[in-house]
Image (tube, rainbow, N blue to C red):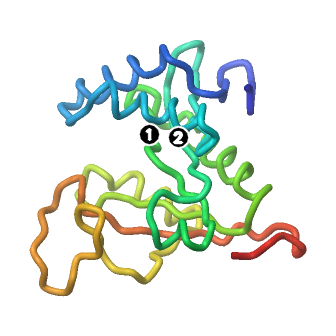
Amino acid sequence: MTYFQSPELLIRDMTDPDVAARVADDMAHGWETSDARHRERLIDAAAGRSIALTADYQGQPAGFLSIYFPARIYVYAERGIPELVDFGVFDKFWRRGIGSALMDIAEGIVGERTDRVCLGVGLHSGYGTAQSLYVRRGYIPDGTGVWYQDKVCEPYGECCNDDDLILYMVKELGGHPCKQNN
């Protein structure tokens, strides 16, 4: 399915060939990655648990974002709140509005179902650009504190400033007053 199209940018459903592009980009950054990790997004989309988006810029895969209905993390799943997962734009395509377009489309899709959305963002400096983007877009910390390895990190608990150290954020989308507000 196509969600957005302009002369340079296309936002569409993720397909099998997109997995290789995502893995290659992860490897170029020296990040821990696997084909299975990204293929999971396709499997979940096929099962109706998510929508996996790909942004193509001038015909090349340039960014990705998945929307889970409901969130994968229990705090939000219990409330039926969707979660944005695995958002990223390849470095060579930064500053072209691709990330904002992906977020606009994802928030629009979520807004058709509910008034809130959540996401988790890493806390080390490698996530600085994403952290700034989320704050500018109106996401605020959810009040559960810092999470480490999928659990709330207790005060003074041990953790490592790696990709598993996460802050969850929520955004009120507004929308129609008759929508179910979880």
Packing grade of label 1 (10 A; few <14, some 14-19, many >=20) is: some
Above-or-below relation of 38 to 121: above
Quadrant hosting residue 115: bottom right
Nearest the viewer among 13 and 59 is 13
Choose mark 1 or mark 2, whichever is in front. Answer: 2
| Residue contact at pointers 1 and 2, CB within 8 angstroms | yes
Above-or-below relation of 70 to 177: above
Q: CA distance from mark 1 to mark 2?
A: 7 Å
Q: Which element carries disc 2, helix, strand or loop?
A: strand
Q: Residue at x 49, y 56 (%)?
A: 133
Check disc 2 and give the amino acid type. Leu
Residue named by callout 1: 88
Q: Could you tell which of marks 1 and 2 lies nearer the N-terminus?
A: 2
> Horizontally, is 114 left or right of 23 in the view?
right
In x, y percent, where is residue 140?
A: 50, 74
Count up the numbered dots.
2
In x, y percent, where is residue 83?
A: 54, 57
Q: Residue at x 57, y 29 (%)?
A: 54
Check disc 1 and give the amino acid type. Gly
Image quadrant holding the C terminus, namely bottom right
In x, y percent, where is residue 117?
A: 60, 63
Nearest the viewer among 8 and 160 is 160
Nearest the viewer among 106 and 129 is 106
Which numbered circle lies on residue 65? 2
> Horizontally, is 132 left or right of 54 in the view?
left
In x, y percent, where is residue 167?
A: 36, 68
